Amino acid sequence: MIENIKNIDYYMNLPYTVLIQKVENEGKPYFFAKIEELPGCHTDAQTQIEALQELEMVKKDYLEIKIEVGAEIPEPSDLPSGKLLLRLPKSLHKQILKDAQKESTSVNQLILYRLARQTGYEEASHHTN
């Protein structure tokens, strides 16, 4: 049996989320870069390219230390499941049930429609699986 070994190359090639933000300090701009899934993995530099290059070095150091001490290393995740457990007042639940019945639709579809409309999300009807 072949064991799945998660070494430095494995982690370095994962599609982590990189965030780069332009920041000003006393009128001087610089770029702050971080990997969203790896707490504490960040750096800054004078240009975006330098920040990205330095972030790769910081990421490697970060991962090597985590591997060395046997610490858990977060991996990038896909989109959330799309499932949400929601508690609401009984009176609101009753109103939603009435509204769904009046519209001849399911409670799920009614809530999805209203939430999408309120947030400006236009693709809600395509993501109901």
Image (spheres, rainbow, N blue to C red):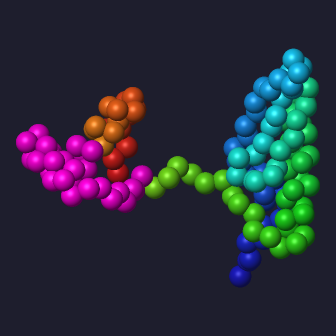
Q: How many numbered discs, if any?
A: 0
Residue at screen point 29% across, 55% down: 88
Q: Residue furthest top?
A: 27
The rendered magenta stretch, by its main secondary structure, is classed as helix
Query: Does residue 103 belong to the magenta stretch?
Result: yes
Magenta highlight range? 82-111
Vertical order, 36 against 24 (above or below)? below
The spot of residue 58 in percent (x, y) is 89, 48
Residue at 39% across, 56% down = 84
The answer to which image quadrant residue 66 occupies is bottom right
Residue 57 picture location, percent across and down: 91, 46
Residue 117 left/right relative to 27: left
Q: Which of 103 and 128 lies nearest the eye of the viewer?
A: 103
Q: In the rendered view, would you say 109 is above or below 25?
A: below
Dividing the picture into quadrants, the one containing residue 32 is: top right
Residue at image location 88% in from the left, 35% down from the top: 44
Left or right: 54, with 94 as reference point? right
> Left of 123 or right of it: where is 28?
right
- Work out which residue is located at the far bottom of the displayed protein and give it: 1
Q: Is residue 6 visible?
A: yes
Q: Which is nearer the eye, 78 or 45? A: 45
Q: Identify the residue at image location x=61%, y=54%.
A: 77
Residue 122 falls within the magenta-colored stretch: no
Q: Position of residue 86 (x, y in %)?
A: 35, 57
The N terminus, quarter of image:
bottom right
